[in-house]
Image: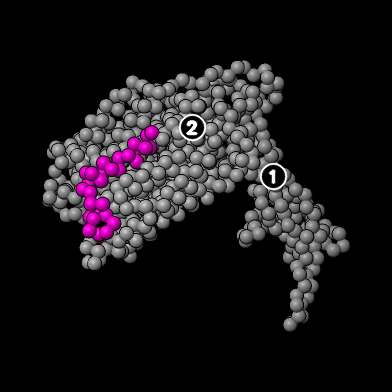
Amino acid sequence: MSASTPSIDAAPATPTRRGGGGVVIAVLALCGTVVSLQQTMVLPLVPDLPDLIGTSAGNASWMITATLVAGAVATPVISRMADMYGKRRMILVTLAIVALGALVGGLSTSLPFLLLARALQGMGMALVPIGIATMRDELEPDKVPLAVALMSATLAIGAGVGLPLGGFLAEAFDWHVVLWLPGVLALLMLGLVLVTVSESNVRTAGAFDFRGAVLLSLALVLLLLAVSKGADWGWVDTRTLGCLAAGVALLAVFIPLELRIPNPLVDIRTAAQPVILAANTISVFMGFAMFVNMLVSTQLLQTPKATGYGLGLDALHAGLWMAPSAVAFGVLAPLSGWVTRRFGPEVAIGAGGVIMAVSYLARVPLSGSVTLVVIGTVVVTIGTALAYSALPTLIMRSVPVTETAAANGLNTLLRSVGTSTASAVTAAVLAATITSATKGYPTFGALSTMFVLAAAASAVSAVLILPFLRRRAAEGDTQSIETLTVDHVVRGKVVDPKGVGLAGAVVTVMGGRGSHMDWSRSDSAGDFSVATAGPIRHLFVVSAVGWSPASFYVDLTDDRHLAPFAMAERLTVTGEITDALDHPVANASVVITKRSGGSVSWVRTDDTGHYTLPLPKEGVYDLTAVDRDTGATHSHILAVGGRSATIDLQLSLPQQVQPGSTPPPVESD
C-alpha cells in the first residue's frame, strides 16, 4: 500500500465490464415467476381441504400462513447468505427447496406434511431479491433497470396467474397437481440456471451471523402470526397480544446485537440511511396498497349480485378477470425500466404513488361493472409497476455492491409485511360490516374504506420520496454509467493510531481515474469489504466521525487483503478555561451535551486550564464548563461541522436570586 499521490493519469487502463443479456434476464425472471406462482396456486384449494383431508377450516387456513411466515423468515436469511456464499449457489438451493416442498406436498394426505410442504415452497420467495442482485452483477448497466423491473414484476405476475391456474388445475385434475407442478417447474429452472447463469465474484467477507438469524426469524414468526391470525384469534386475544409482545421484545434484542457484532445479518447503520429508510418504509405502504387491489377487486367480482354491488362471478372466472393486471406487470416492465433509467428511480416511485392514489379514489364511484373493475385493477397496476421496478434500483444505488442481495432481501421482507397487514386490515374492516341484514357479505362502504386506505398508503409513499426527488433535481443526475468491471472484492480494516478498529467508518473506492466503484461501512471490529476492478491501482477515501478524512492510493494484488487504513488526525474541541480575572482554572469540568437532552462526553482541565474533547458527529450541541469549587459556570453553543474547533470559556459566578424576584438569564454565548 502506498499513501503517495502520483499522477492519476498514470494509472493503468481499467478493463471493460462483464457481458450478459437477454437469456440471463429471461431465466431469472422465469425463476421469479415460478416461486411467485406457487404462492397463490393453492388458494382455490383451501376451501375444499377440510373435506379432502378431514380437518377444520381454521386448520386449513394454516396452509396460507405457513407459506407467508416461511417466506418472510427465509428472505433476509438466504439473501444474506447469497452475498456471502454466492448468489447463483443460493438461487439453486432455493429452487431445490421449492422442488422438495412440491415432492412432500404431492405425496401427502395429512395436514402436518402439507404444512411442511407449503413452508418449504414459501422459502422460494427469497429468490426474487437474489435474482435482482445477480442482475446487477451479470448485466451491462443500461440493461439493469429493465431487468430489475421485470424481476420485480414477477412477484405480481406469478401471484396473478397462480390464482386462476390453481382453480383450473384443482377442478380438472387431482388436487395434488396444484402442489407438485411448481416443483416440476422449479427443477426445470434449476437446470436452466446451471447452464446460463454464472457465479458472481462479488462476495462479502466474514462469518454468518447465526445468532442474528435465529433472533430475527423468531421475531418475524411471532409478529406475522399475530398479524395473519389476529382476525381468527381476536385482536385482544392473549395469543395475539403475546405474539406481538414477544416479537417486539426479540427485535429489541436483535437491533443492539446487530450494531455490536462484526458481519451482522442486517446492517442497521446502512439501513438507517435516509434514502434506504425511506425506500423500506415505502415498500411497506406499497405492499399494503398493492394487495388491497387484489383482495378487494376479487371480493367485488365474487360477491353475489343480490347485495346490490357484487358482480356474481365464481372463483375461477374472478381469477381470470384478475389476470389482465398480472399481465400488465410484465407488459409494463420495459416502460418502467425506461422511466427509471431516463428520469431516475425517485421519479418512478413518486409517479407510481400518485397514479395509485388517484386511481383508488376513482374506484370508489367507478366499480359497478366487470369492465370498470378490470380497468381499475389495471390502472392501479400501472402505478404499482412503476414503483416496484424502481425500489430495487434506488436501493442498489445506495448500498455497497457486496450488500445488494441482503438489502433487497430486507426490502422484499418489508413488502411482505405490507401485504400481510393489508390482508389483516381488509379482513377486519370487511368482517365489521357483515351482519344478518347483509346476508353474510360486507357492505360496499367497507370496500370503499379499503380503497381510501390504499389511496392514503400510496399518497404516503409519494410524499416519502419527495425530499429525495427535490435533492435529485437540485443536484442534477450525478449517476454516471459505470464502465468498470466491479467483481474483485477486497477486504481491509480501518484502525486508529493505536491499531484499534474503528466502527462505522465509510470507505469509498474509485478507479485510478476517479470513476466511482463501490463503498462500504466498517463493522464493529473495523473490518470492511468493497468491490473493485481487479489487481490495478485504486483510490480509497476513508471518513469517520471524529477523524479527519484519509486517502490511500493502492496498487491491488490478487491477495485481496489490504493493509490496515490508519486514521491519523483526531478531530477535537479544545480550548482554555479561565476565571473572571482571566486566570487558568485547573480541574474544571467541561461537558458537551445534546440540545435535545443527554451528555455526549466530558473531561477535566489540566493544570494550565486547557481541555481536549473528541469532536462529536455533525450537529448543534451545548459546551459547558464549571468550576465545582466556586460554582462559576459558562455555556456556549457548539456547532459541529466536521472540523476541529477551539473554544475558550471564561467562567462567571451565578447571580443570587431573591425569593419572589425574576431570575436573570443564564450567561451564555
Residue 53 part of the magenta-drawn span = no
Q: Depth-wise, is mark 2 or mark 1 nearer the camera? A: 2
In reply to whether residue 330 is colored magenta, the answer given is: yes
Query: Residue at horizontal 52%, vertical 49%?
Result: 464
User: 184 or 98, which is in the foreground?
Assistant: 184
Q: In which quadrant will I find the N terminus?
A: top right
Please state which amino acid type lies under the numbered disc 1. Answer: Gly
First to last magenta residue range: 303-331
**Image location (x, y in percent) of residue 402:** 49, 33
Dot 2 or dot 1: first in sequence order is: 2
Q: Is residue 73 left or right of residue 319?
A: right
Q: Is residue 619 visible?
A: yes
* Tag shown at residue 642: 1
The residue drawn where x is 55% and y is 23% is: 483
- At numbered mark 1, what does the secondary structure look like: helix, strand or loop? loop
Outermost residue toward the bottom in this view: 660
The disc labelled 2 sits on which kind of residue? Trp
Q: Can you tell which mark lies on residue 141?
A: none
Few, some or many residues within 10 Å of mark 2 (<14, 14–19, 20+): some
Residue occupying the far right of the picture: 581
- Element type where label 2 sits in the image: helix
Residue 381 left/right relative to 591: left
Q: Is residue 629 left or right of residue 218?
A: right
Q: Quadrant of residue 609?
A: bottom right
Q: Which residue corresponds to mark 2?
A: 338
